[in-house]
Image: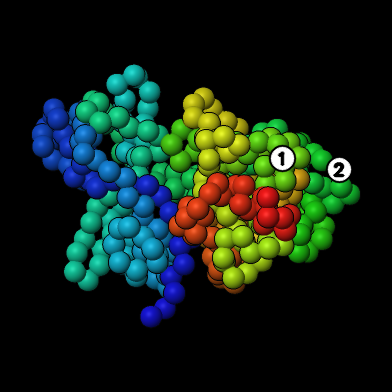
Amino acid sequence: MPRRPAQFSFPTYAATSLVVHRGANERDPIGGAADVVPGDSYRLSREAAARQLSIWDGPSGAEVADGSEIGQPGDRVLLEVCHSMMAPGGTLVELLVLTVTGEADTARVFLPLAPMEPRGEYELVASQTEMAARRLADIASVSFISGTRLTMANGRQTPVEDLQPGDRLLTRDHGAQEIRWIGQQVSRATGALAPILICAGTMNAANDLRLFPHHRLFVWQRRDEIGAGRSELLVKAEHLVNGDTVTREEGGFVESYQILFGAHEIIYAEGIAVESLLVTPQTRAALPEDVATDQTDADRFLASDLEVDRNALSETGDPAERLTRASRGSKD
């Protein structure tokens, strides 16, 4: 059976848990663009439970990856639409609807881009199929939050917002490399885009570092603390949350910048080794059409091979503390 390593994992809900409470399609679950009517009011069930949908880039498009809580490895994953809804407090909540299709079953799920409260009234405002890929790219793409200092080729620490294409940064594997493209966006710091704060000293950070949940840190273990069987690891920031030295910051807005090189690189942010933007079918939607990249399938497979599964970090002890010890080769 072929390996299908997860490239992205998202908390999703069954479409049947978000149902029209008042409106033209009363009692119908959330659906695709042709299945909904603007103005209908939806409620999220009290029993709604998030389940991880893990995907990877299969030969014919997005597929369910190994370890996914939804579907079976190899099932097709189709991104249908982005719905915009007015929340009870007057804020706008976007959600993406996806369909998972296997040989035996088809399931429809939705991925909220901001927290949703059970029993709250959510009025459907608009539905856009053309925006769905871009909104998924916003979540899947790794970005550096304004104020984060990156290490230049000459060793100087420079805030990401001061960088320009053509500037050269220090990379772990290929020395000084030129930035090909920088993307900038402002987003609500909620849900999948709520930053993870890594306090100074944790994971050997020189200063506080804020990363988005899916941004991966590179860890070189001097001692195999977690039993991965290898020294080189990639760890998502969200897997390190411990409520103390690594926390989630929910609320407000953040400005962030995507950094693209010719290859997927490991660079340095506030002294920590972290990844640059990895180009996949999901993240490609965030790039202008005229931006070229030399990244290959080998870049994606290597990154997947090095990534640590959440379960490997949650068995015993604080994951951030364990990996900090591993990087230092110490037992305490």
- Return the residue nearer the eye: 99 or 293: 99
Q: Residue at x 49, y 59 (%)?
A: 312
Instruction: Place residue 92 in its image quadrant.
Output: top left
- What is the x, y in percent for residue 28? 13, 40
Q: Secondary structure at mark 2?
A: loop
- What is the x, y in percent for residue 90? 34, 19
- What is the x, y in percent for residue 36? 20, 39
Q: Residue at x 57, y 60 (%)?
A: 226
Residue 21 visible to the viewer = yes
- What is the x, y in percent for residue 135? 44, 44
Instruction: Place residue 63 in its image quadrant.
Output: bottom left
The numbered dot on residue 201 is: 1
Q: Residue at x 50, y 53 (%)?
A: 316
Amino acid type of the residue tagged 1 in the rendering:
Gly
Q: Is residue 136 left or right of residue 332?
A: left
Q: Is residue 144 left or right of residue 9?
A: right
Q: Residue at x 21, y 31 (%)?
A: 43
3D distance between C-alphas at marks 1 and 2: 20 Å
Question: In front of the other: label 1 or label 2?
Answer: 1
Residue extending furthest toward the bottom = 1
Q: Secondary structure at mark 1?
A: loop
| Mark 2 Cα-neighbour bin, 10 Å: few <14, some 14–19, many ≥20 | few
Residue 303 visible to the viewer = no
Residue that mark 2 sits on: 156
